[in-house]
Amino acid sequence: MQPIMAVLLAICGAFGALLAVLLVRALGTPRAPDPGSLDPAALAPFAGLEDKLAALVRLPTVSRFEETQEDPAPFREFPREVERRFPVVHARLRRDSVGSRGLLYEWPGTDPSLPPVVLMAHYDVVPPGEIPWTRPPFSGETAEGFVWGRGSQDTKVTLAGILGAAERLLEEGFQPPRTVYLAFGGDEEVGGARGAALLARTLRERGVRASFLIDEGGIVADGMLPFADRPLALVGIAEKGYVDVELEAKGAGGHASMPPRSTAAGTLARAIARLESRPFPARLTYTVRSFLSDLSPYVPFPVRLLFRSPGLASFALIKAFSAAPTTNALVRTTQAATMLSGSDKENVLPDRARAIINVRILPGETVAGVLARISAVVAPEGVTARPAHEGLAVEPLPESPTDHDGYRAVRSALEAAHPEAAVVPFLFSAGTDSKHYADIVQAVYRIAPIRQTSRDLAGVHGPDERISVENVRRCALFYFELLKGM
């Protein structure tokens, strides 16, 4: 009996010590300042930028995986429209057309010893889809306080914001201390091979080694994390990798009226069920730990107990995060069956059944490791696994530090443009063009400096995409402050 009591006392003591540490850290968290508010006068210099964005939205720059399926006219017109709308940038900065889908501007800095900075955006868009729009998808109408149209959020608004800020600063005679490259690609939605990849190669050939890069990614999230007491400016300091895995099961085929005990479709179904019952292990990356720690001043005290010490509370945090799809994606590599195929006739057994598993890879893991694990899980069912598309897999990019000039500059600019929000690092689950620049930049930060609700985000790749006029101007203010602060 005594050994059991000793063990119980030791467990209680350890739990008490852990709780004491959590309490001390939570109580020691500085009180968050009250949310600020933006002086409307700060946006006055950017009045009218929404009209320039609307003109860019009217160009239906829909990209396709097959270039022959695209309408080339809007892509040819886009650089000319940029020149018309931002004449000072065009006149004073060096501009290069790179391939058929790249625009590159160079703004020389005053101190050549400082490594340069790259500001990115893409101007291609996805098709408008089949669901009816309230306003035509390429109307570029300004109504009800919004600019409407495909690309208004994703991401012609950031392109207009960058150029609008540069235009204003050039008019004031400003010259940045660091050289700044403005890199705009026209095929991000289909991988970036004709745009960002060539732009990055051009910089690489020029010997550019940048301090940091800013691309699309997180947003100023309004009401999306209900336990936070204010909007959150989510700066993506990491980005998941990507691979599509093809599963294949083979069968004898034949007439469905005389099926074997197991068909190719049944075998594939069992393999998928086996895969779904064995998710990738969860863990807290540097990015997620930083997110929780920086978020802790803005959440209720019970939540702060866990967020302030993510290492000590990792078991509870992983358990909680695993419960919902949105947070589960932050702590593990995800795998989702998205496409299934078998026989092409109702009464014919398939001799081959196929599935595509879409995998988003957590930083610290690899494409090869993902393929090996999935293969091991499905092999007992007689199913094979291989990459679905050769050459299209993307390794996770390294996590960028928050103790870096780039992050500090982004945070300062966000605090100026969105003083009501808390700036926190974040893991971005989707893919961006920044992957093409990984070897020529020290750090990558992903932020679209626009305030968005869940309803707003529904327009990205959906019907009725739109951006508020205030957001357009705030976006430009962010880049204005960023360029001045570098």
Image (cartoon, rainbow, N blue to C red):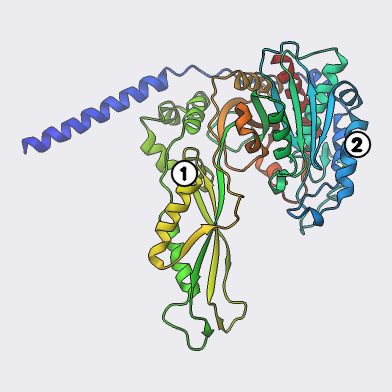
Q: Tag count in the figure?
A: 2
Nearer to the camera, 117 or 475: 117
Label 2: few (<14), some (14–19) or many (≥20) C-alpha neighbours in 10 Å: some
Instruction: Say whether residue 143 is visible.
Output: no
Q: Which numbered circle lies on residue 332?
A: 1
Q: Position of residue 162 (x, y in %)?
A: 78, 27
Does residue 176 lie above or below 464 as drawn? above
Q: Position of residue 203 (x, y in %)?
A: 71, 29
Q: Earlier in the sequence, mark 1 or mark 2?
A: 2
Q: Quadrant of the C terminus?
A: top right
Q: CA distance from mark 1 to mark 2?
A: 43 Å
Q: Position of residue 365 (x, y in %)?
A: 47, 41
Is residue 441 left or right of 19 when viewed as pictured? Answer: right
Q: Which residue is mark 2?
A: 81
Q: Residue at x 46, y 44 (%)?
A: 332
Nearer to the camera, 27 or 65: 65
Identify residue type, mark 1.
Arg
Picture quadrant where residue 441 is located: top right
Mark 1 near mark 2, Cβ–Cβ under 8 Å?
Answer: no
Circle 1 sits in a helix, a strand or a loop, which is it?
loop
Picture quadrant where residue 271 is located: bottom left
